[in-house]
Image: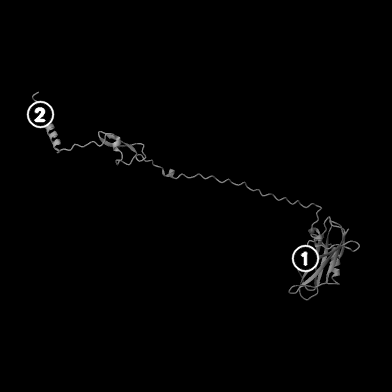
Amino acid sequence: MMRNLPNQLMIFVLAGTIIFLAGAGCIQVPQAECADSLDCQDRPHAECTGDWSCVEGYCVYECELSSPLETPTVIPPQAQVPETPQTPRPTPPATETPEEPETPPASDDTLLFSELELDAQTETNIADTLTRTFFAVNPPFKMMAPGEGAAFALGVKNLQPKMADYKFEVTFYQAQNDRGNKITDDPATVDGWFEEMVFEGIEVDPQTTHIIPLRVILPDDVEPGNYIFMIKGYKYEAYYKPEFSSIELTLKIK
């Protein structure tokens, strides 16, 4: 008990000294900042979302752990700008090209121009005619039936000492009945009757003759009558000039 006396005396002495100095103003005892959390409002605090609290007279600001400032959310680079999915354009349905109807093959009864050739008698007759004239058609008159075809010989003779260039042109004059009255003179009436109606660039050597087959096929619905055609001949001298008098070809359709 006596051993602890000096220690207790020392404590009393120190405590008295502190009280004396405090009363004298030598030691400043800090004042409390707050009595409750309301005294801490409007004070500067850390940049986070939280609340003030008064702990043992001191203002303490506690941040919320869920605050985005404390725990920032990291956005993956690929997720920052999401791509808008593109709707694929519908493929338009394929347009089917209508098939063109096939042309039926010609029947065995269909007459073709290529099947019409000059017979031997016609060639003999035109050759004989050209001994008396320079320009002729044989036969000049022929009786035919609807749907029938024929080949006429159109001949020219060149008596000049040099080659000559000729042109021949077949034109429709008119159709007449048996009394000689005109039925029609419309050129469309004979469309397609002749394989060719204009022959141009026919070169004939001097002192020779040249024969051209003139092929005709009549339609099945042609009207009866006398169909008269005029054939004109031209010779080239800088341009095609009329060289011969026109000759006549008549088709009498029954």
User: 4 left or right of 130?
Assistant: left
On the question of residue 156 being in view, the answer is: yes
Identify the secondary structure beneath mark 2: helix
Task: Residue 227: tell me if it is visible.
Answer: no
**Rendered image quadrant of residue 241:** bottom right
- Against 54, residue 240 (above or below) is below
The quadrant the N terminus occupies is: top left
The residue indicated by pointer 1 is 198
Q: Counting other residues with Cα less than 10 Å from the Cα at mark 2, is it few (<14), some (14-19), or many (20 or more)?
A: few
Q: Amino acid at mark 1?
A: Val
Q: Are marks 1 and 2 in contact (CB under 8 Å)?
A: no
Q: Which residue is mark 2?
A: 9
Is 160 left, or right, of 17 in this rendering? right
| Residue 82 x/y as whole percent | 46, 44
Pinpoint residue 248: horizontal percent, then vertical percent.
85, 67
Q: Residue 232 lies in what quarter of the image?
A: bottom right
The quadrant the C terminus occupies is bottom right
Q: In the image, what residue type sits under mark 2?
A: Leu
Checking the image for residue 117, the label placed there is none
Helix, strand or loop at label 1? It is strand
Q: Position of residue 178 (x, y in %)?
A: 90, 61
The residue furthest right is: 179
Q: How packed is label 1: few (under 14 Cα within 10 Å), some, or many (20 or more)? A: few
Q: CA distance from mark 1 to mark 2?
A: 157 Å
**First reached walking from the N terminus: tag 1 or tag 2:** 2
